[in-house]
Amino acid sequence: MKTSTLTKQVVFAIMIVMLALAVLPVQPAHAAACSWDGSSSTAWATGANWTGCSGGGGVPANIDTITIPSGVPNQPTLGGGGATIAGLTVNSGATLTLGTQTLNVNGPISNAGTITASSGRLTQQTTGDFTNSGTVTFTGNGRIYFAGNVTNTGTLALGSAEVRFYGADAGPFTVAAFSTTGDIDWRKTAGTVTFAGNVSAAQLLMDNGNGEAGTLILGSGNTFTFPTVATISGVAFTNNGTLTVATALSGTGTLTNSSTGTLNLTGGASSITTLANAGIVNMSGASISSTALANFTNTGTVNLNTTGAITGITNNANGTVNLTNSGTITSFNNATSTSTLNISDLTPPTITTLTVTAAGNTVNYNGAGAQTINTVPTYSNLSTGGSGIKTAGGVMNINANLTVGSVTTFSTANSVNIGGNWTVDGTFTQTAATTTFTGGGTHACAGAGAIQFNNLTTSSQTINAGSCDIRIVGNWTHGTAGTFNAQTSTVTFNGGGAQSQPTTAFVPQFYNMTVNKSGGTLSPGRVWTVTNNFLLTLGAFAPASTSSFNNATLNGGTFTAPAGGNLNVSGNWTRNGGTFTAGTGTVTFNGPGAQTIGGSSATAFNNLIFSGSGAKSMGPAGTSVAGNLTITSPATASVGNGLNLSVGSLTLGALGTAPGTWGYAVASPPAYANPTYFANTTGYLTVGTDTRGASTVTVTGTTSFNYNGAPQGPDTSTVTGSSGAVTYSYAGTGGTIYGPSSTKPTNAGTYAVTATVAADGYYSAASSSATPFTINKANQATLTITGPASMTFGDADATITTSGGSGSGAVTFDAGASTACSIVAGNLHVLSGTGTCDITATKAADSNYNSITSASFAVTINKANQAALTITAPASMTFGDADATISYSGGTTGGAVTFDAGASTACSIVAGKLHVVSGTGTCDITATMAGDNDYNPVTSASFAVTINKANQATLTITGPASMAFGDADATITTSGGSGTGAVTFDAGASTACSIVAGNLHVLSGTGTCDITATKAADNDYNSTTSASFAVTISKANQAALTITGPASMTFGDADATITTSGGSGSGAVTFDAGASTACSIVAGKLHVLSGTGTCDITATKAADNDYNSTTSASFAVTISKANQAALTIT
């Protein structure tokens, strides 16, 4: 059993050890700390120079990571045969010399000292970082291999050494800056390496036929110079910095030049299958091989300054290609809307297939001199830049926009078809054929250059002309659906023969328009609208009626106004030469401000209209109007100072005028001055024809007047026409003798008036028909009675006063239907103190005034006051008294007397007598004797009556008659008393009771209890107290008394204490054994007399002041015999 347990313990321990060993890291076969000590010599192969190494003879083996320290006697030199180790560390101050030998390191290399080689090799062919903070120097054509990260803070003097990159680790790895005049040879089969510093080499070899792959990235912000980059195939090659290839770029792979990259190709021959550019590519040199860049896609900028041949370029989104030399391109495609091709060489390159149809792409001929534009393709956007003449030798098809640069000339004798906008800052010259704007939508012109079309065709487009200078030599054809927006452009018609313009259904508006034709006509008889400046310098111009111009200038040629029609001019009219043929037409100057008719040559108008607003200046001398000049306000004519211009007739507003001189000169006014239609100048117009209208005058106003002592009659009228003075002539009619006179009549009568208006500059004179009118007698001024305002019965007769009235008529009075007054001898007499008194006054007529009666005047009639009235009794009363008769004296009428208790609180008037309402309060009464027709009622002074309270009825306590101690507090009952006073109780000197909360409370079962009741006074009754009432007080019965023990006793026991419960009060408790035979009471305790017999006991608790005595029920105690003493047989 023990042996078995021990065996299990041993096995378990072995398992634990095995598990512990299983989780320990696997150690190499030998992990020696191999270090150079140089104690013997400089020879690497001498074991005595090493310590802790695992190779034969003590030298390092391929599993050793070695350290070369400083401060040892000798520093190592690698001898013949080289060496292979697992890792290398060269400490600061230490030196390792490779010479011509090869040191293979299958792990990391860290150098803080010095490593030198001539044609030897320092290689890493498995993953490991290379860290240098010291100096690595190659003096010959040796090699250095990298297989991980390369960090250099020291010196890498590689000379002509070849740099190789080895390994298949994915990395990514970062390589610091280095330079060699040898090659860089990529031998990696996987992984990513980024050159993070500046790197240069004789060439970069990417494919040696050994399955090279992985990714090489040239870091952003760094410079990389490789005369040759050869055989890019399986390696993904990306340039983010500046890469210069001075000789050739070749391979069947892909070179990606990113948005931060710059690729400089300066060699003579490059051949790479795919170049994807998002940055900048600069190509220069004598030639590029014909197989170069078979798949060249560009989204950045490509500068082609090469005479060589390029197979194909696809210029993608946001890409720009600048052609600065005259090589050849087999195929070029501006493939997207944001692609741009700039051709600056004066001998543009030969492009076999040029594809530029992608909507929105741009081709720009921007050389510094003359260039020929390739007219084979259809362009989207085409522009010219640089300088010189850009000649289109064939038909140009432009789907979108044409832009001509500021110092360039686009020249063609062929048709040009434009589907978008055209911007000309230089010169557009078309000497033959037609420019056609194709498609719908809006076409905008911009730029400050000159645009000359031979023929122009527009149809359904909207043309926004901007500020362009547009010149049309031939015809302009336009459909009716489109729109020409002149904006601020200038359109010049300068052909040498007949020029036709769009159908009259299309009426374009021009901003500036110039006619400078050396021959032929310009669409005569059509409507023209020029919103800024019209200039005629040469040729014939005959606009149709309703044509309108802002400023019109005639420097030459012939301008013929439409016969019987109208031309509108909203600006200035200037004639310096040429011929203006007015015919029978009208010219209207309708500008919103000042306008001028001027120039060095006078203009002879037929009809002329000034409308709009502002001053219309007229000059120079000789300017004339053969027909009519019409001026409508607020426009004014401003005739040049000192000028006298001839006008056939003149209309101001809608008014004709008189012949003579017209104007407005404050200093020397003409015959007719009008400041509304003429400015204040010393020039004037001489009008030959009278065109004034007829006037009418009608007398207006009232034709009935009332005599007022002053001259009266109509003196207003309604005039149409003339503003001349109106005069009036008055004459009597129907027997009234007066006038005729210009003075109005004064006396009453019947008359007639005639009004005459004088002529003015616009209307002739006129007279009205005779209008009758009447002057009637006047009514008097209002007559008013002013007094007396009131009278009292018994007053003496009063004088009546008046105001108002007119003339000398007598005044009489009338009391009408008044009942209280009458007129006696012209005075007012009071008949009664009651009734009405309404009087009127009448003033008689005289020769000038009608009679007048005043309004009725109400006189207030007052009754007389009676003699004083006085109350004499009663002087006092008590609550409960019978109502009393009130006595008084005085008064006059003997009328009925009434009484009033007013605000009294203790009394009132009931059936004419004084009634006491309360024993408390005030009692102030008045008496009023009624008035009659002649006297007012009279009220006495207030009379104070003293009011007294009454005594209550007898108050008696009726119960309770008796109470026992312990009873609940009892309600005390009473009878009698009066009023509403509260009832309170008092126990006085009682010893057995008291009053608690108004109830009777028993204090003790023994003593006296005598109580009284008091009913308080109220407003009507005095307080009262009852007689003393004796209440019989009894003691209470105690609670039941019970004996509780002892329940049993034995003969011989000691006397026992008897226990009880119950009872009340403080009485003593005693016990009694009655007829018991076995027990007795001894000193208040139970004593056993015998072990045999009965024992029935009672307890009695004595009475006290509050409780009666009580005795318990009989309590049976069981009595037992005692045991004998031990009996012993002796």
Image (cartoon, rainbow, N blue to C red):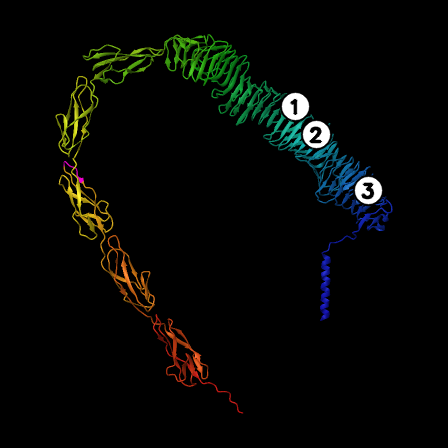
* Residue 768 sits inside the magenta stretch: no
Q: Amino acid at mark 1?
A: Gly
Q: What residue did someone put label 1 on?
A: 367
Q: What residue did someone put label 2 on?
A: 283
Q: Position of residue 876 (x, y in %)?
A: 20, 49
**Whether residue 293 can be seen here:** no
Are the residues at dot 1 and dot 2 in contact (C-beta closer than 8 Å)? Answer: no
- Which secondary structure, mark 2? strand
Q: Position of residue 900 (x, y in %)?
A: 20, 44
Q: Position of residue 107 (x, y in %)?
A: 76, 46
Q: What residue span does the magenta drawing correspond to?
A: 933-938
Circle number at residue 211: none
Distance (Cα) linking label 2 and label 3: 46 Å
Nearer the camera: disc 2 or disc 3: 3
Which residue occupies 73% across, 60% down?
17
Distance (Cα) linking label 1 and label 3: 62 Å
Q: What residue did someone put label 3 on?
A: 95
Residue farthest bottom in this picture: 1130
Q: Main secondary structure of the magenta part?
A: loop
- Which secondary structure, mark 3? strand
* Residue 934 sits inside the magenta stretch: yes
Residue count near mark 2 (Cα–Cα under 10 Å), binned few <14, some 14–19, many ≥20: many
Are the residues at dot 1 and dot 3 in contact (C-beta closer than 8 Å)? Answer: no
Q: Nearer the viewer, residue 645 or 917?
A: 917
Q: Which label's residue is closer to the chain start, 2 or 3?
A: 3
Q: Is residue 373 left or right of residue 995?
A: right
Q: Amino acid at mark 3?
A: Thr
Q: Quadrant of residue 289?
A: top right
- Image quarter hosting the C terminus: bottom right
Q: Quadrant of residue 988?
A: bottom left
